């Protein structure tokens, strides 16, 4: 009954354009302020469906100038994002919506698996060089149950499923770029949970989620020397499709979920990357996932049939 009541509520998410009452635009002045704004927006989005009130309304004001209203004919608005986001192409991860930001706030680059290819790197360098006055953050955003990461995990676990990808270079390039994170995730899961970890019922699901976090971490690690400035920080995080929070599975047993919510600076050394990977592998959520079979627990037969049906990584 509680589920039925939640689904029966009306939620209004309104993007309001009112030239008579333009919103006051106050851009973040520091990376920390920009980070808080993104996290506040994500919390508002995540909690919108879970609020106890009936008829929830969330209003996001659009500045007239930011959508080209009131400027001279033929003149485009000035671009002034406060954050650049490298995200996945997955349709379930609408970047502006999950952070509750408006037009001209975010410079968004999306590619399957949120990898740092030459096109993505060029776009983010462009943002860092051309919006240096407004840009305060460069964020790598992975997400749970990522299709591209899942394809890489399947190729790692069952090499025979890699052959169809090998015949399509663009898809193979995406999977190949993620395999480093997958291999690293498999090694840390084995180190933490023992050599027989791959026999646990939820191993594939845990390997996917560990790889998702490490893939985002490694992308941010690679971006830091390229785009980080004194006034612009590089961060990373993962959007959880179930809870709608941006987080990392880091909390140990008996810790609360809020300790996992947030955006995180990438490690600076190999040792710090290893420490982060160990924290992921020992977290309560991933440890529980290892022992609880779910939709992601399957074998090569299912993986092959999914590809034969035409599924592509997202």
Image: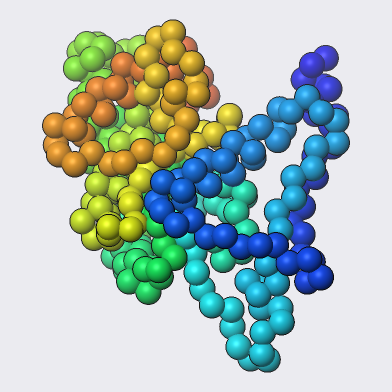
Q: Residue at 49% x, 43% y: name it.
A: 36
**Count of numbered marks:** 0
Q: Quadrant of residue 134?
A: bottom left
The single residue placed furthest to the top in the displayed view is: 254
Where does residue 60 sit, x and y in percent of width and height? 70, 53
Q: Residue at 21% x, 56% y: name it.
A: 225
Q: Quadrant of residue 126?
A: bottom left
Q: Residue at 25% x, 53% y: name it.
A: 224
- Residue 77 in the image: above or below residue 123: below
Residue 292 placement, left or right of 173: right
Where does residue 141 sit, x and y in percent of width and height? 43, 46
Where does residue 282 sit, x and y in percent of width and height? 31, 16
Where does residue 84 sit, x and y in percent of width and height? 43, 59
- Residue 68 in the image: above or below residue 276: below
Residue 168 placement, left or right of 185: right
- Residue 149 in the image: above or below residue 229: above
Q: Residue at 78% x, 66% y: name it.
A: 21
72 or 115, which lies in front?
A: 72
One can see residue 63 in this view? yes
- Residue 32 in the image: above or below residue 282: below
One can see residue 148 in this view? no
Quadrant of the snapshot with the N terminus: top right
306 or 51, which lies in front?
A: 51
């Amino acid at each position: 009954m509680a589920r039925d009541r939640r689904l029966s509520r009306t939620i209004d998410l309104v993007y309001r354009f009112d030239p008579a009452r333009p919103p006051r635009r106050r851009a973040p002045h520091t990376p920390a302020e920009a980070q808080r704004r993104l996290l506040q927006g994500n919390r508002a989005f995540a909690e919108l469906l879970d609020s106890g009130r009936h008829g929830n309304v969330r209003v996001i004001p659009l500045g007239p100038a930011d959508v080209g209203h009131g400027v001279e004919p033929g003149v485009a608005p000035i671009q002034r994002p406060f954050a650049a986001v490298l995200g996945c192409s997955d349709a379930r991860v609408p970047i502006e919506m999950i952070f509750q930001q408006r037009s001209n706030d975010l410079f968004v680059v999306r590619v399957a698996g949120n990898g740092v290819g030459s096109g993505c790197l060029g776009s983010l360098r462009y943002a860092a060089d051309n919006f240096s006055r407004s840009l305060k953050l460069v964020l790598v955003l992975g997400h749970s149950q990522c299709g591209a990461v899942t394809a890489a995990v399947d190729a790692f676990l069952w090499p025979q499923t890699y052959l169809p990808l090998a015949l399509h270079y663009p898809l193979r390039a995406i999977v190949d770029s993620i395999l480093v994170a997958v291999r690293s995730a498999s090694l840390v899961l084995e180190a933490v949970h023992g050599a027989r970890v791959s026999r646990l019922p939820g191993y594939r699901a845990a390997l996917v989620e560990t790889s998702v976090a490490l893939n985002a971490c490694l992308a941010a690690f690679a971006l830091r020397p390229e785009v980080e400035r004194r006034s612009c920080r590089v961060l990373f995080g993962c959007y959880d499709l179930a809870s709608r929070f941006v987080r990392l599975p880091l909390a140990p047993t008996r810790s609360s979920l809020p300790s996992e919510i947030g955006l995180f600076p990438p490690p600076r050394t190999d040792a710090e990357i290893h420490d982060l990977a160990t924290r992921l592998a020992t977290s309560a959520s991933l440890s529980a996932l290892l022992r609880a079979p779910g939709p992601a627990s399957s074998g090569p037969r299912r993986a092959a049939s999914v590809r034969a049906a035409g599924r592509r990584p997202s």
